[in-house]
Image: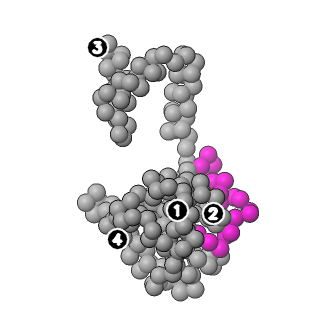
């Protein structure tokens, strides 16, 4: 095999879910693309990696200090939906049923992977609640063991804000499911049927 082809395949295999055969198929597809298109793809990837920022308010991906959701004055600023990852935020946004703000934790508590509460953006959430503007926090995290651990930890932290209503999305989402892969209709029903949880 060509050294150049081998190098491209090796790099593509670094991506999640890409095995040797898929990497080879992608490399051969790239070879058939116009050189300008390949250059544009490479530039977009490099620019994304080097220039992307995290919103200082909600930890969402952004091109500037604040993401478009946080600067949208039409959104309900008394409502915050807490999610694990940016992909979960995107899944909820795609339903078109939620019009509040978000808070991206950046993962879940997972001792096996060395992720503790201090590794997540929980303090940033608490700082946001100190403003007194937020009336309800919707916790929309995965129903995995790690997700449930994170939920219980969040509930213990949110006890410090007795005037804030805390709800979770309805558990119509199957245990162990990742929110990123749940269909939009299920997410819509889960959001509309959320329930309050004791702090």
Q: In which quadrant will I find the N terminus?
A: top left
Q: Dot 4, crowdedness within 10 Å: few (<14), some or many (≥20)? A: some
Q: Dot 3, crowdedness within 10 Å: few (<14), some or many (≥20)? A: few
Q: In which quadrant will I find the C terminus?
A: bottom left
Please indicate whether residue 16 sits to the left or right of residue 139 in the image. Answer: left
Q: Looking at the image, is mark 1 or mark 4 nearer the viewer?
A: 1
Q: Would you name the residue on which mark 4 appears? A: 149
Tell which of 6 and 169 is nearer to you. 169
Tell which of 168 and 171 is nearer to you. 171
Q: What SS does tag 4 mark?
A: helix
Tag 2 and tag 1, C-beta contact below 8 Å: yes
Q: Looking at the image, is mark 3 or mark 2 nearer the viewer?
A: 2
Q: Would you name the residue on which mark 1 appears? A: 187
In the rendered image, residue 74 lying in the magenta stretch gets the answer yes
Tell which of 118 and 92 is nearer to you. 92
CA gap between label 1 and label 4 equals 21 Å
Q: Is residue 47 above or below residue 170?
A: above
Start-end of magenta stretch: 62-80
Q: Of marks 3 and 2, which one's residue comes earlier in the chain?
A: 3
Tag 4 and tag 2, C-beta contact below 8 Å: no
Q: Would you name the residue on which mark 2 appears? A: 97
Q: Would you name the residue on which mark 3 appears? A: 1
Q: Dot 2, crowdedness within 10 Å: few (<14), some or many (≥20)? A: some
Q: Residue at position x 31%, y 15% from top?
A: 3
CA gap between label 3 and label 2 equals 51 Å
> Residue 153, image x and y in percent?
39, 74
Tag 3 and tag 2, C-beta contact below 8 Å: no
CA gap between label 4 and label 3 equals 48 Å
């Amino acid at each position: 095999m060509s050294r150049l082809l081998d190098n491209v395949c090796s790099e593509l295999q670094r991506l999640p879910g890409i095995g040797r055969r898929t990497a080879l198929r992608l490399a051969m597809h790239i070879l058939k693309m116009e050189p300008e298109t390949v250059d544009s793809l490479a530039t977009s990837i490099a620019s994304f990696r080097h220039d992307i920022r995290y919103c200082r308010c909600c930890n969402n991906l952004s091109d500037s200090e604040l993401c478009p959701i946080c600067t949208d004055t039409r959104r309900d600023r008394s409502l915050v939906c807490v999610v694990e990852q940016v992909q979960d935020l995107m899944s909820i946004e795609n339903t078109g049923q939620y019009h509040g703000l978000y808070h991206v934790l950046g993962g879940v508590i997972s001792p096996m992977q060395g992720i503790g509460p201090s590794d997540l953006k929980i303090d940033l959430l608490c700082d946001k609640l100190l403003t007194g503007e937020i009336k309800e926090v919707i916790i929309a995290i995965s129903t995995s063991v790690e997700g449930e651990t994170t939920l219980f930890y969040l509930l213990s932290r949110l006890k410090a804000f007795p005037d804030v209503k805390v709800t979770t999305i309805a558990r119509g989402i199957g245990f162990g499911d990742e929110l990123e892969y749940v269909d939009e209709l299920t997410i819509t029903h889960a959001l509309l049927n959320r329930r309050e949880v004791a702090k």
